[in-house]
Image (cartoon, rainbow, N blue to C red):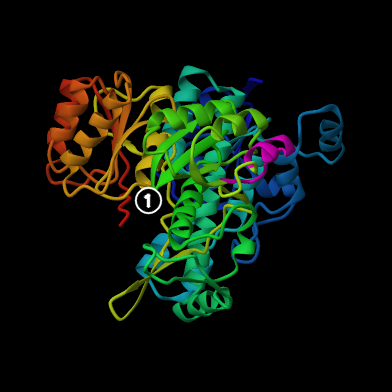
Amino acid sequence: MDIQLKSALISVYDKAGLDEIVKELHSLHIKIYSTGGTWDFIHQLGIPVEKVEDVTGYPSILDGRVKTLHPKVFGGILAIRNEEHLRQLEEYSIPTFDLVIVDLYPFEATVASTTDEKAIIEKIDIGGISLIRAAAKNFGDVMIIPSKGQYSFLLTLLREKKGLTSIDDRKLLAAEAFCLSSHYDHSIFSWMASASQAENVYQESVFQAQSLRYGENPHQKATFFGDLSKVFHQVSGKELSYNNLVDIDAAIRLMADFLLEGPTVAIIKHTNPCGIASNDSVLGAWSAALKSDPVSAFGGIIICNSEIDSATAAEIDQIFYEVLIAPSFSDEALSILQSKAKRTILKLNHFEFQSRNVRSVLNGVAVQERDAVCSAINSGNIVTTREPDTREWQDLLFAEKCAKHLKSNTIALVKNRQLLGMGCGQTSRIDACHQAVDKALKMGFDLHGAVMASDAFFPFPDCVEVAAEQGITAVIQPGGSIKDQLSIDSCNQHQIAMVCTGIRHFLH
């Protein structure tokens, strides 16, 4: 359902770029409501703006800790535009908000710049994160702009569509909003869990010891410390080995980044995905994932983010696999899959993880934060003359997620949300690029119109040149090389769009 924006609530920390937004809103006669410093900023531009405190009847209190937390604000955001909800809004004199624009307190930047606990705590955004979640939940009637990273998307919508929003626009932004709020909360947790606290959490999680069939090789003994029943229920199959657990961990971590893609299937081999695809159906996702590399799929780990139905189970049952993981299975699917007793079926409880990765190194352990960051549409810097179109944007974000879960150095090639080819674990980026292209061509894929993702920057333009030879039309990479311009120039020469995210995804 298309909705014409008529009112906007704006509450942002960083005002950069906001002037263009409010000028466009004003030109479209969209009524603006705002708070505190944001109200001052808009008012100084000479643009009419209503104070939220005039709506709520309460001023900003507790040194600004409470400004928008009021039923008259959240009622106007969360109300479904039906007869009963609108009647209640009228009864209590609550305005509707069709657009909510937020830019959160810079918590991570504050943590990076100071050790002052009081200063850090004051940068934990409460009202802003609540506005984001409320507007994202009600995407059927409200558009959320959760950070200034989405300003260019909003400006395009205001200028080209005159403030008319589609359900697809709103749902996409809602998904990005929840991705952002999840990352924000994770950052707060990571700071609050001090090194000693993290160690205690880890120790509490490993109180159980479970012998495994063997380690990486049959001559190696192995033990798992923890409680696997909290992660999954083993429906059938033989006891898990060390390699099984490592691959299962990689599979679940990967799929956690694809939960918003719709039905998605990934096939993991030695912790690397050799097939990934999203589709309108689970069967379609399975078929496309298998086509990515049916040879490597033999003996792999299969994971799906949706229920496995009987039709999909019948197709999966035709190949040999070690482990199949999904949140649920239909009764008919289980009947098919359990016919082969040695194949392990796992019913996943959740896609959640501890916020830290722990690895033994030398004579101790190394602990790091989990790589929980994924790019969002228009969040990167488009550095080329040609911009990605809508389909290319979807594929670029999909490809970046694929590359994030492939061992470095890596290149991922994607088209229509299907992994066509990948190069991983290479000692040079161009080797990874050639491997990805060779693999895709060997599987019979046409790379014209495909996109390329790299886990780290291009030190030379050679990968772009290979992409151009194959008809690849868009590239996503972190950027940051002193020779970035060479790759950018090559892209412009070949009419390839390039997005630089500023985010590296090395995986060792």
Q: Residue at x 72, y 35 (%)?
A: 332
Q: Quadrant of the C terminus?
A: bottom left
Q: How many marks?
A: 1
Q: In the rendered image, which residue does mark 1 sit on?
A: 270
**Is 319 situated left or right of 74 in this image?**
left
Q: Is residue 403 in sight in this rendering?
A: yes
Q: Quadrant of residue 412?
A: top left
Q: Is residue 18 in sight in this rendering?
A: no
**Is 266 situated left or right of 67 in this image?**
left
The secondary structure type at the circle numbered 1 is loop
Q: Residue at x 30, y 28 (%)?
A: 440
Residue 393 in the image: x percent, y percent?
Answer: 40, 29
Residue 176 in the image: x percent, y percent?
Answer: 52, 40
Q: Quadrant of the N terminus?
A: top right
**Is 502 situated left or right of 391 in this image?**
left
Residue 78 in the image: x percent, y percent?
Answer: 72, 40
Vertical placement of residue 40 versus 119, above or below: above
Residue 311 in the image: x percent, y percent?
Answer: 63, 27
| Three-letter amino acid code at the position of disc 1 | His
Residue nearer the viewer, 127 or 136: 136
Find the magenta span and give its range. Answer: 325-337
Vertical placement of residue 485 versus 157, above or below: below
Vertical placement of residue 157 versus 171, above or below: above
Residue nearer the viewer, 89 or 176: 176
Residue nearer the viewer, 456 or 157: 456
